[in-house]
Amino acid sequence: MFRRAQLLHLKTARQGSGPKKGAKNRFTGLLFCLLAGLIAAGLYRSFQVAAFLPLDADRATPAVVAEAMLAHGLDALNAWHSTQDNWLLSAILPQFPFYALLGQQAWIPALCGWLGFVASCALCGVLVALAAAPRPSAWLVGMGLFGVLLFLNPLALGPIGFLAHPVSHGVTCFWGLAALVPCVLVLKRRSRWLLALTTVLLLVASISDPWARAAFVLPLTLAGVGVCLLPSDARQKKTALCLIASTLPVWLAGAHGFGLFPGIPGTQFTKGALADIPHHAALGFSGIAVLQHLVPGTNALTHPWARWISGIILLALCGLAAPAVSNSLHDQKDGPRRFLLLFCALSLSVTFAAFSLSDFVTGLDLTRLLGNFAFLLPLALCLCGCIGQARPLLTGGLVLAAMGGVLAGLLPPGGNHATPQKALANTLQLLAFLQDHHLSHGYGGYWSTHANASHLLSGGHVTIRPVAVRGAGVLYPREQQVFDAWYRPQDTVPSETRQFFIAQQDDELCPDTAACVALAQHNFGPPDETLLWGTVPVMVWHKTLFPSAPMPDTLQRAPEFSANPTEDQSLLLTPATAPAMLWRGWASVGPDGAWSGAQLAGIMVRLAGPSAPLCLTMRASGRSSAPPQPVTLLRDGTAIAQWAVHAGTPAPYCTGPLPAGDAYLVLERAAPPHDNQRLLPGILLSTLSRPHG
């Protein structure tokens, strides 16, 4: 009887569980459809915002480098004079196939920027789903986070956060987030060999953008140390050691990627004054509130009170999440989530501290240096919402904040619905004016004319090369975001006998129109024509403007070094002891200390004391496959030594005994695309000595 009653009870229970299970499945299906709709709407909305972003000189970088790569191959990467955040591997190479297959199309930068932003949002969802698994709702939570992030406000995607720009720290966030996926899989007992992928992804990010070291590499190293120190089983500690080891090649690679990219400028970080730290911290807090704007119908820039509300909400959510973070850090069974929470906390702390300490911070537009907050802060809060303690209150707050963020992105204030054509009106009108007057090649300011975007925006009909002023009013090629080859006669078509200069105010050129006109006349002489585009003069010459002939007061001279065998046996040339002009690039040096676009460069060696040999220890910069650097030593106009200096290990090059006097070390520019090679102290010329005898 008892067994029969037990079977009857089981049968009833099974019959009753059917409707409940069906209702749960229907609810899950409905929630999946709602989240899929949210993602679809977010994709459409974010594409609208990305398409609005105007094409400027920086956003055109992948296009101009891709054009050079199609002509010269991968060697163009080392010929490109980039900034320290160079984007060579993280943005330029991945976007190259678009330009190779589709040509120079003005809509490609917007598409690439949008795809990078969407991929970063998707990776956040994947990380949450992996860390929260095997919970049935894990992937639904990941979908929800993906959908909400797609509605980040237009300021975050555009002029403040730059998250949807094709070359920005938002691109670095994609590579950094992708590097976290193998880490989470390894912590879930997958093969540790997956961490090799983490190393590769971090190398791509850090070589292309030094900011990645503060935002991803250092936090990942410290998170591995944290997992080792927290209560963990033996396997987790071994995995944590492997995580730390996966970042070591990134630190060893340095800024130049094991010497593969010698043209990349070194990393620079300048600490600001201690008195500025509170101001920078307040600016950073405001920037975070702009990135995570939660007040619908308001503009985070023009409504400071809306920033305060968003900031207070974020602080309240962080306070509610604190107990969940504490519990997760002491939970040995939840390794992936503990690691991710540690990483997010460290990444946000390190970047905010660097932002507050730096003297680089001047305004909210530098919030792009806190771009990781747009992804990692929601990721960390979402992970905390999946933990049992304080879950109802925290989960409710997260849902309300998510709704506010979605509505703020979906319903921006009026005035944010401009079109790309309106935002680019001035540049497009200038290019049309130049085309109407049959002008196709000229020079102007990098920012005022968006020079590097001119070729892309005009469909290849107009090319503007950026120039900058140095020293006593001398126009030179801009130091960064350019190729040397742009300023040689070969860059122009023989039929282009009319070249122009746009005399428009630019911070790198001149403070006003009159100064721009005087600057151009000082360098190129009186113009043959002067056209007016509105109030801006477009000065035209019937000749090639670059390389310009030296003016009487700008005759070139060589920098000087002294070598006396009766004093120091050797003179070590470093950035501290060599003239700063020698670290700027390749060519002859003018009296203002800047480099021009000449074919030969000269360094004067002033010999003193008794007759003695002159020895130079040299190596060529650039890749080992590049041709040797031709070097000639002249004395009284006669070549007394000729060397072919190779890249790689520095080697000594010596002459016979030389009496006191002046000798010239003449360096010949290599043929394209190897013309970015340099013979510089500390890079190629490492020591200069005159040993006895």
Image (cartoon, grey):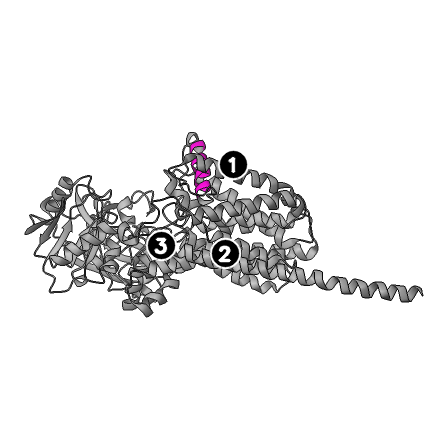
Sequence-wise, the earlier of marks 3 and 1 is 3
- The amino acid type of the residue labelled 1 equals Ile
Residue 672 placement, left or right of 344: left
| Magenta: main secondary structure | helix
Secondary structure beneath label 3:
loop
Residue position marked by numbered label 1 in the rendering: 312
Labelled disc at residue 27: none
Residues rendered magenta in the picture:
278-290
Which residue is at 58% across, 60% downward? 30
User: Residue 428, position in %: x, y?
Assistant: 22, 54
Residue 655 placement, left or right of 192: left
3 vs 1, front mark: 1
**Quadrant of the rendered image containing residue 507:** top left
Labelled disc at residue 264: 3
Residue position marked by numbered label 2 in the rendering: 38
- The amino acid type of the residue labelled 3 equals Ile
* The N terminus sits in image quarter: bottom right
